[in-house]
Image (spheres, rainbow, N blue to C red):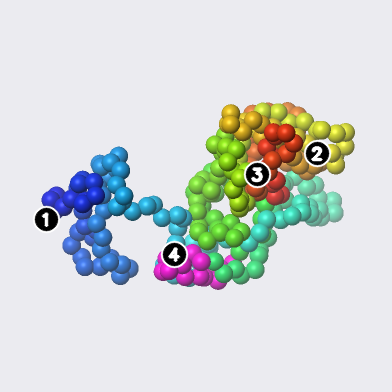
Amino acid sequence: MRGALFCPGCFTNVERTPKEKDLFTNQRDPFYRHLKRWSHVACVLRAKKPVGKRYDSWEEAKRAIEHEHLAIVKEFLQERPEIELVPSDEYDETPVEDTDGPVSEVPIGRHQGESFELPSKITTVAGMCRNFEKNKDKYFVLPGAIHAVKLAELLSDVVDLDRSVLDKHQKPKLYYGKILRSWNAGRYSTSIRMTRLRCGQGVGDFTVKMPDGFCQAKNINDTSVGRIVMFYGVITKNGGGDRSGTPRLG
């Protein structure tokens, strides 16, 4: 019947997977899938892409963590990490911005959301940005999440936001945006630094507001135009029309 099987919904070709065996090697039942060459044809019977990655066993998930393919983020640090200096030594490195967290139960098993107890990390957004080229393809389980998702897929561009987000219940997310302007709204390091990001026309303007001293430590200053900033939080309305992030330490 190969080549002569058709979907009853869109009438395009489908194929059996696996083609001959009664079961997959992991004991899953076979199924029928649409051929890639018909992916442009919409069909209500087409299976939706699963959200995130799930693991067959605790051992598989633990191995992924050991090989740095998976990270369980228990929480984000609320205070800047302290820099420990050894007397007579000159410090010239960025502090390590993550620590070992407790063993956490996360529902990332493939079988009916089976939970595994796995080691976690307490980190900062800056810690996730370090070695970004490597981390963007790494799977992360963020606080409160039920899926392990690639960092590249977790990121939301501020440009894609619209006003409707303010009318919905929000969970903290990872956002990023391009800096248009950044300035200290006061005179002191404790004053708020306004960092304006490029956004969509429907939003008006979008500003990340954090203490100037904190931003300066992250190299966000008056000369940061054109740089990309990444933060974790929810979006709130401020004033007559400004939109601002309420970011965690990043």
Q: CA distance from mark 2 to mark 3?
A: 17 Å
Tag 4 or tag 3, which sits nearer the N-term?
Answer: 4
Rendering coords of residue 240 (x, y %): 72, 33
Rendering coords of residue 114 (x, y %): 47, 70
Residue nearer the viewer, 40 or 86: 40
Identity of the residue drawn at 27% across and 45% down: 36
Q: Amino acid under label 2? A: Ile
Q: Amino acid under label 4? A: Tyr
Most common secondary structure along the magenta stretch: loop
Tag 3 or tag 2, which sits nearer the N-term?
Answer: 2
Which residue has dot 2 on it?
192
Q: Amino acid under label 3? A: Ile
- Dot 2 lies on which element? strand
Identity of the residue drawn at 52% across and 70% down: 116
Which residue has dot 4 on it?
55
Q: Amino acid under label 1? A: Met
With respect to residue 216, does 30 lie above or below?
below
Q: Residues within 10 Å of mark 2 (few under 14, many from 20)?
A: many
Tag 4 or tag 1, which sits nearer the N-term?
Answer: 1
Q: Which residues are magenta?
A: 107-119
Q: CA distance from mark 1 to mark 4?
A: 33 Å
Q: Note whether residue 71 is visible.
A: no
With respect to residue 110, does 84 lie above or below?
above
Q: Note whether residue 240 is visible.
A: yes
Magenta includes 172? no
Q: CA distance from mark 3 to mark 1?
A: 53 Å
Horizontal arrangement in the rendering, residue 27 relative to residue 68 (left or right): left
Rendering coords of residue 164 (x, y %): 58, 41
Question: Are the residues flagged by discs 1 and 4 in contact, CB closer than 8 Å?
Answer: no
Which residue has dot 3 on it?
235
Question: Are the residues flagged by discs 1 and 2 in contact, CB closer than 8 Å?
Answer: no
Q: Nearer the viewer, mark 2 or mark 3?
A: 3
